[in-house]
Image: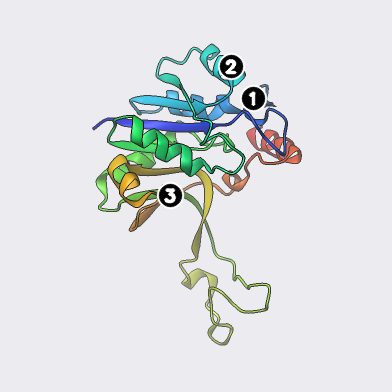
Amino acid sequence: MYNVAFIPVRKGSKSILNKNISPVNDKPLIYWTTLAAQVSNLDKVYVSTDGDEIKKVVEDFGFSKVEVIPRSEYSSSDMASSETALLEFCENYKFDNVVFLQATSPLTTAVDINCALEKYLKSDKKSLISAVKRSQFIWDVNGNPLNYNPQNRPRRQDWDGYYIENGAFYISSRENILKSQCRITPPVDFWEMKDKTLFEVDNPEDINIIERLFN
């Protein structure tokens, strides 16, 4: 089995200028996810970018497993999703399974990656999603309960709860991604992470929160 990481990073960012190389805990944001992948059991780490400055920053880390690869103009546009970059990668590179990592989730660790990948490889599920488990009761904006019956309100200790995607990573095979044209192919499994991993770097104030969580 040849298992790889894929980390897409665009040079453009609406919320934070040069977000992916902005300092977070004294290192560029992209450093933390790349480091976790580098020290994990993965065979190779691909960082896909359209930015020359990002390319230089990542290459200067000196990580032996990491290769910076180009991201096309189409998959780098403001309208393109990271899904587009993942599909482009799957079409152009050969591997068995991919851990699709998000640079905006710097609290991801190599332990998370290794344990999640091991769980995925041992299961019969087609995809694995990193997530946080919660047990709150949820309502929509129109006042309708979404995940329980108020007339048969369960005790929290008797209820399995639900999972929230934390956006840290997704694991799937190249074959399934190309077939479904999506990062997730049902049936799915989950790798449960700590509550703090729900925080991602999307806005300037998120950096302060993440740095507190680091420390």
Answer whether residue 114 is visible to the viewer in this image. no
x then y, percent, for residue 96: 27, 36
Q: Distance between the residues labelled 2 and 1?
A: 8 Å
Q: Identify residue type, mark 3.
A: Ile
Q: Identify residue type, mark 2.
A: Val
Badge 3 element:
strand
Q: Identify residue type, mark 1.
A: Ile
Picture quadrant of residue 67:
top left
Q: In the rendered image, which residue does mark 2 sit on?
A: 57
Q: Residues within 10 Å of mark 3 (few under 14, many from 20)?
A: many
In-image side of 196 versus 111 (left or right): right
Q: Which of 135 and 11 is in front in this view?
A: 11
x then y, percent, for residue 6: 43, 32
Of the 4 image quadrants, the one containing the C terminus is: top right
Q: How crowded is mark 1: few (under 14 residues within 10 Å), some or many (20 or more)?
A: some
Q: CB under 8 Å between callouts 2 and 1?
A: yes
In-image side of 210 versus 149 (left or right): right
Residue at the image position 56 percent from the left and 28 percent from the top:
32
Q: In the rendered image, which residue does mark 1 sit on?
A: 21
Q: CB under 8 Å between callouts 2 and 3?
A: no
x then y, percent, for residue 188: 36, 55
Between discs 2 and 3, the one toward the N terminus = 2
Q: In the rendered image, which residue does mark 3 sit on?
A: 129
Residue at the image position 65 percent from the left and 32 percent from the top:
12
